[in-house]
Image (cartoon, grey):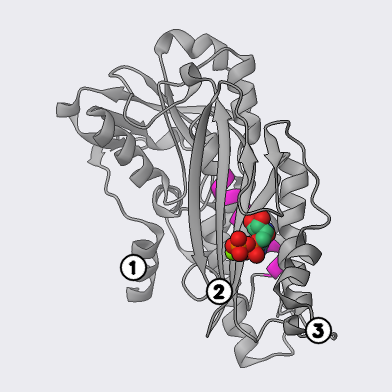
Amino acid sequence: MLEDKTPQRTDIASLGEFGLIQHLTEHFNIHHSSTVKAVGDDCAVLDAKGLKTLITTDLLVEGVHFNLSYMPLKHLGYKAVMVNLSDVYAMNAEASQITVSIALSNRFPLEAVEELYSGILLACDKYNIDLVGGDTTSSTKGLLISVTAIGHADEKKITYRNTAKENDLLVVTGDLGAAYLGFQVLEREKQVFEVDPNNQPDLDAYTYLIERQLKPEARKDIVKILNDLEVVPTSMIDISDGLSSEIIHICTQSKVGCNLYEDKIPLDPQVISVCEEFDLNSTTVALSGGEDYELLFTIAQSDFDKIKGNPHLTVIGHMTDANNGMNLITRGTNQAVPLTAQGWNALLDKNEEN
Ligand code: ADP
Ligand code: MG
């Protein structure tokens, strides 16, 4: 379906390792004065100038975290950067550098790696990130990509998961559940394609969902918005596994409970209509879907007036005493249902049973 049918295949061995690294990294620009030395020596050298340094890393493995039959390599490169930047923004910090390490089997020609790096380059230019290093090696089977992101922040602004307080408001950015549904749509089209390769999928009704799955955006803008509004969240996390499990992380680590209101969960209209088509409950999808890369945070009630009316931010609940537990307050019936930490894998398994 979306498989890259690149006609030209240049053997990577023809460039040699140094030639390859040089070729892949030559178009990357340096955006930050904190980058003293980027690619080309034994180490990168950074100077954070009094700010604290934040580091996060993620390893993505073909067949486990991504499937190249519907994930174009350019999108994979972009997404691999996004998932790491999202972790930096989730600390209320500015992301400034990345390193990228790849392991390639001989199935990948130079053109494929160029595609991957074009996505990485796009992400770096759009998010103002310097590529400062990495490693390149071979694998016996498949593709591995590991990105490490480095960020900086004033110590007073760094926001952890374990510092939410009772009575704080629980706030989420953007809308939820779309990335999971995008994955479901792509899986379905892949199966249709396997049966009939001439079948051209009509994906117009799913554009937002597919984009959220294939080209997620990390919420750099939120760090700036919060800074401009002079709001420092009391706790923050990014939503990679699903709203429910992220709320549970904040509550457990902060030793508080929470009430999450079902009718407040922000959903895109496309999520609502495709949930009906797939016979899925939209609340379940938002709670357990994952890969939304939105930010979930808590603020003191006294900061409510500052965020009120911001179109990117939705108050979805409040923190309580730990004895209250972590509850979903249902729409209409106002029942308190305990939240469970189902990731999207659990959701998938459930679908397969049906
Ligand atoms: P070493 O042998 O010291 O590990 P390498 O030959 O692996 O050095 O890397 C040379 C330089 O190129 C280093 O600055 C390294 O960080 C960078 N580099 C290597 N692979 C990549 C990659 N895939 N992407 C970006 N930079 C890379
Ligand atoms: Mg190396």
Q: Which residue is mark 1?
A: 350
Which image quadrant is residue 300 in?
top left
Name the residue located 27 percent from the left edge and 28 percent from the top edge.
Answer: 254
SS of the residue under disc 3: loop
Q: Amino acid at mark 1?
A: Lys
Q: Using the image, determine if residue 340 lies above or below residue 263.
A: below
Query: Camera-side residue: 237 or 107?
Result: 107
Across and down, in percent, residue 309 comes to: 60, 19
User: Does residue 75 show up magenta in the picture?
Assistant: yes
Query: Camera-side residue: 46 or 226?
Result: 46
Ligand 1 has an atom within 8 Å of the beta carbon of the residue at disc 1? no
Across and down, in percent, residue 178 comes to: 56, 53
Crowd band around label 2 with a 10 angstrom C-alpha radius: few (<14), some (14–19), many (20+): some
Crowd band around label 3 with a 10 angstrom C-alpha radius: few (<14), some (14–19), many (20+): few
Q: Residue furthest left?
A: 323
Name the residue located 46 percent from the left edge and 49 percent from the top edge.
Answer: 240
Q: Which residue is mark 2?
A: 187
Q: Is residue 302 left or right of residue 32?
A: left
Any part of residue 209 in sight: no
- The region drawn magenta spans 72-85
Disc 1 vs disc 3: which is toward the camera? 3
Any part of residue 281 in sight: yes
Q: Using the image, determine if residue 281 lies above or below residue 175.
A: below
Q: Which residue is mark 3?
A: 10
Quadrant of the snapshot with the N terminus:
bottom right
Tell me the CA gap for discs 3 and 2.
30 Å
